[in-house]
Amino acid sequence: MVHVYNCHPFASQQIVPTEQEPGLFCCGGDVLFVVSAVGCKIEAFSLQEDRCTPFCRFSTMGNVLRIAHSEVGDYLVTIEEKSSSIYLRAYTNWRCQTAEKTRVGVRLLGHFVRNSSFRSSPKEQMEIIEIPLSETPLCISCCPDTGDLLVGCEKSLIIFKLKNEVLHEQLSALDFERFLILHVPGWIPTAVCYCAGYIAVQIDLEVLVVKLEYVQKSSQDVSIMLGNDERTDDKPDLKRQASQNETDDFCIFQKHQEMLGQAAVECGVSVTPEKTGVDFDEDIKIQYILYRRFAPDFFQGHTVEETQLRSLSLLPIYRTGDSNHCGDVRPRELLNMLCFFSLPNTGYLYSLKSPVELISNYQYPEKALAAVLSTRFLYVITSHDLQCFTVRCSALAARLEDPYMDTTMRALCLCKNHLILLSKADVDSDGIDRKVTKSTLSKKASFKKKTPEGGHGWNLYIVDNIPVIQLYREMVDYSKKYSASNSQSQNCVHLLCEAHLLLRAALMDPMLTKTDEREELMVAFKESCILLGDCYSRLDTRESHLALPYYKMSGWSMTDIINRNLTFSQKTHTFGKGFMFYLKNSLCDETGEELSTDIAEQVLTIFSSTEPSQLPHVVCSPSMINGNPATTFTCLEKWEAITPSVTVTLTKAAIALKMKDLQLYKRQMDRHAEMLQVYGFIEEPKLLIHRTPEGIKPTALACHLRETQDGLLVAATVALHENGKMKLTEADVFFKVLCKETGHTESEPQLLVDFWEALLVASAQESIIQDLLFKLVSVYIHRISAKENLGIKPLKTAEDLINSSTHYGLIFPWVTVITPAHFNIAYEYQEDLQKLQALLCGPSLEVSSIFPLLEHLSDKDNAGFSVHVLCASKQGQCEHAIVKLLDTCPEAIMLYANHELHHDKQALWWQKLLPELCERIKSSEDESDILLFSLKETLSVIAMELNPLDFLCLMPDDGMAAFFLPYLFECSQKSLITQGECN
């Protein structure tokens, strides 16, 4: 529904001093181009803030049917008719026509004059470029981003790329190159638009929007057709022909249809790209964006011709950064693309960026002749009225009626802050012109429109918009009148929203470069935010939550906003739903603003009377740090008497600490078991941690738990992490800050390591697990290698972790031989070593990830040696491990072999272990009982695994065969038994 308000965005108007009756006109930059009604003369006028002055004039080669201007390249393009033939022409360097009798050059597309005289003395002159086409051009559009040209023809759409052809060092010229042809069978376009790759095509009752997508070049042809039916130019769309086929008696129309996004592929309209000989660096795909079809509604009193679609346009919305110190505007970013088209009584505005959606439809009070869209307003002309709509969802209609009933508005276009309007006189049936008396096109200025002596009844006007700030003030004044009459009126909010969006659109304007103007707009923008916040905070509607973002955008402090609403509540004796929503979220946001004692007490009073269930959460907010603890404790006790909970009890304990009453604190903490207290911390994390703008800050309760109940603190922090209330990085900072206050300077304090170990036991997220494993291994290795005695007992021993977590495995027997329990190492390092060994014996640790850490751990002692051998074994380097063990700790070799040499590693018994033992026994000067025992055990295993022939091949030929004979006999007996069982 359109809301109509008496707000006029027009400030002044001028009459364009044209010499002849205008026919067509368009704008480009700060220039207005007017084509005479005869059609062969173009006048250019310079548009300035307070005047419109002639700039130049030049003749065209034919009668102009369509005209468009491109700011990129500063060229005009026209569709002209001459001698019953239609031509497409581009006019470049038209500004040279400011001088009288300036030369004009005419050339074909892609052809240049390159003789020696031209190269030696380049002359600036206007050029007319003939663009040959095999089909009749019907409509044109220039891309505002690139200057490329889109031409709509009877059977296809043709894109010409704008390029700058360098003729020689002193001169270059604009030219076009045929880039792409899009075949759209069955569609004869009445209008086209082209912007940033988006192409909009309009026929009588249908609109199609597609987008050109550039993808990596493949071996496939660039021609791509989307849709269910495969059609070519040789096989036209029979279904569409049938639907458009007319007989003498009736006409067939299809029903209304709207297809958005990917669904538009099924619209039945095929768009086929065709190469033009230009080298494509990428392939081109057609992405369907929007399809809309209308059926004529004759009940509204319109003919078929009147029902046709009109005013198709694409409007890009850009975001741009501030200007740099040189005043240059930074590259802009496309935020959204809007598409507008109109029926006689309704206009439609679509957003084409994901998701594609209808964001507004405008119901006109009477038949519209034309419309033009800007970033702030939609301007619509009817036969007698100029109507102005804000561009948001069919919101404000600031309508201005023209009392002239003898003039008809025919056309309009937009140039920055100027609206160009053409009006022509209507003649009564008796042939007498109606009297022209007086017109007021805005409340700011008026003028008399007199019929010229020549008798013509037309005028071309330039209507200027008033400054945005002035219009904003007027709209705010109107909203105050609505609010004074009815404080619950939705019209007040509606009007303020439109005023706010006007300021927002002005701030997003890429052309806004003046610092003082931007600052003035920002002040008004923040004022509009606070006014909207006030409205939403006091209205009891489903949109009341919008008070929060508007108050935030205003930049006002929480204290100021609370005072504003306290003043309002004194009149109504209530607090608005939106204000309570703002207050709750602001206290939870932890913005760093500390309320004074008086304001904090007011906040307690507000929540005690309206939402007492929120008291624990409010009290724990960092903003309430200055609140009176005695008053706070009393409020909590009253609420606990009604609804007892663990969270309220924990909050009371925190307040008791603030009051330095340890006995009261202990009584509160003893009321619930630690497991229930963990649930209380989950419900209100701010009992333990505050996130201030300066960073993570532990609460006084957390500091006290560190000294008295560190296990509860760790368990609560793990629970917060697992419930998504605290990130791992935040927990790391939390414990580091917490332990730093006690004088611990190490980078990873023991309480943090306890937290990592507890979280590793509880977590099921693989990414978290791998991160924790790396952190813990790093700490364990650092402590073992640095040999620093912290003197702090960990919460869990290695045995506890092995029993409670699958990530810590049982330590292998051969490892305990290298580093037995009575190993000569401090207790803390024994625990760290066993934890590290348990992780390496477990299934989760990726050894390759800790190789950089192993460089800091020496293998000269047994502790480091055990870790290095474990890592080598886990990497499959068993041969290396066997050599290392035989060199350093041969007592562990058999336990190692029995544990590790299985399956694909079994062959190492006779391929590696047996030769190493024989070699070492032979080279040993003293007979080693350990090596002999290991050799006998190895031969026993080999005898059970190999057949006699293979075992015989292993026997040495150096006179030691007698030692192997008993094992050969054992191997033969085993073989005979196996054969007997098989027989």
Image (spheres, helix red, strand yellow):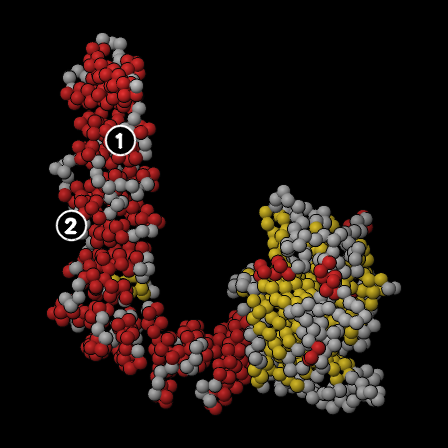
Q: Is residue 465 visible?
A: no
- Nearest the viewer among 762 and 789 is 762
Image point (19%, 57%), residue name: 711
Residue type, label 1:
Glu
Residue count near mark 2 (Cα–Cα under 10 Å), binned few <14, some 14–19, many ≥20: few
Question: In which quadrant will I find the C terminus?
Answer: top left
Local SS, label 2:
loop
Residue 624 image point, x, y percent: 28, 73
Residue that mark 2 sits on: 793
Question: Above or below — where is 962 with respect to 641?
Answer: above
Local SS, label 1:
helix
Q: Which mark is residue 751?
A: none
Which one is earlier in the sequence, the residue at label 1 or at label 2?
Answer: 2
Question: Above or below — where is 397 with respect to 184?
Answer: below
Residue positioned most to the right: 83
Whether pointer 1 and pointer 2 mark residues with C-beta atoms closer than 8 Å, the reply is no
Residue 559 image point, x, y percent: 34, 77
Image point (65%, 63%), residue name: 208
Question: In which quadrant will I find the N terminus?
Answer: bottom right
Residue type, label 2:
Lys
Residue that mark 1 sits on: 900
Image point (23%, 62%), residue name: 678
Residue 443 image point, x, y percent: 62, 87
Task: Find residue 346 and report its image quarter.
Answer: bottom right
